[in-house]
Amino acid sequence: MAWPDPMRAASVNRGGVAPPPPIDIMAAFESPPPPIDYVLPGMVAGTVGALVSPGGVGKSMLALQVAAQIAGGPDLLGLGDLPTGRAVYLPAEDPSAAIMHRLHALRWCMTPAQQQAVAKGLTIHPLAGCRPSLMDDGWLDWLQRTAEGCRIMVLDTLLRFHAADENDSSQMTQVVGRMESIAASTGCAVLYLHHTTKSAAMNGGGAQQQASRGSSVLTDNVRWQGYLAAMASAEAGRLGISEDRRGEYVRFGVSKANSGSTFHGLWLRRNEGGILRHDPSVACRMQQGKTGRAPRDRA
């Protein structure tokens, strides 16, 4: 028996939104369901997720690299093979010139074939100064049409896509609900970038679920939350990384995933042009520390 696609089942008509048909319980009993479609490790297609970090750590570059990889670019982050498809990146903070500089830096990490794939599969709409709003029906319609046929749509940053009070649970429920409607109707994963609280940034708590700034709805109501955290001074000391090089390293991980296996965090190193690359040597240093061997600093 064929399984219905719940992401495509809802339809909009003049009377309003028609909910999806009920689940066929006997079909669930009698035949295996299709495999879960993961866009990122632990993040399911057609759901909403968040990437949180303090300002200036590199989440915009990380998001651009993720979108580029999904569009057919290289795996610089150590995420492994990801199903490819169209991707949309919507930067509403940085000007077009900054995005162009990041793309030019990425160029040197790609083969000509990968450059062509990314140019074809990744769409970037620079929205700085355009005041996009999830709560505006016109903008919501545009965002939904933009997400059609895509695997992922990145909103950079969430604060630039609404004018609501992010500490108000009721208002944030509506904002997240608007993103959920986009994801559910298109099957596109919606990933929004957000800042951590000041206390989490200062106390090294960026990897915690509660690190997200504002209402707890911004964590509780999403299916996935990733984080990007700077290397703390104590971590650098344990790993034998000098203080003057500590700022080159950030840790990417998943603090919440409602589906999938545990994703172990990755250490990334910032390279020329701000490009983030997976640095497996940090994991080796951690293992050396566990076995009692003193790690050596690297250039």
Image (tube, helix red, strand yellow):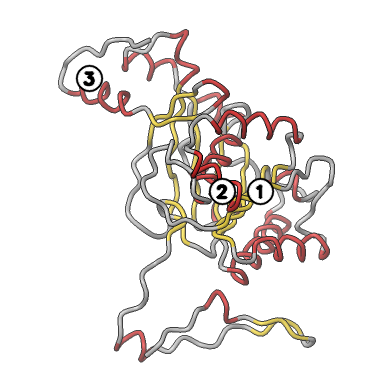
Residue farthest along the front direction in this orientation: 112
Tell which of 125 and 57 is nearer to you: 125
Label located before the other in sequence (3 or 2): 2
Counting residues from the N terminus, which is met first, the one under dot 1 or under dot 3? 1
Neighbor class of circle 2 (other Cα within 10 Å; few <14, some 14-19, many 20+) is many
> On the image, numbered disc 3 is attached to which residue?
289
Q: Which residue is mark 2?
A: 50
| Residue marked by disc 1 | 155
Up-down relation of residue 281 to residue 12 (above or below)? above
Could you say whether the residue bearing mark 1 is in a helix, strand or loop?
strand
Disc 1 residue type (three-letter): Leu
260 to 26, vertically: above or below: above
Q: Nearer the viewer, residue 193 or 2?
A: 2
- For image coordinates 51% across by 44% down, the residue present is 66
Image marks 2 and 1: residues in contact by CB distance under 8 Å: no
Which of the two marks, 2 or 1, is nearer to us in this view?
1
The C terminus lies in quadrant: top left
Percent coordinates x, y for residue 274 in the rendering: 56, 25
Q: Nearer the viewer, residue 91 or 176?
A: 91
For marks 1 and 3, give the one nearer the viewer.
1
- 252 in relation to 163, above or below: above
The residues bearing labels 1 and 3 have C-alpha atoms spaced at a distance of 39 Å
Tell me the distance, in whole angstroms, between the alpha carbons under discs 3 and 2. 32 Å
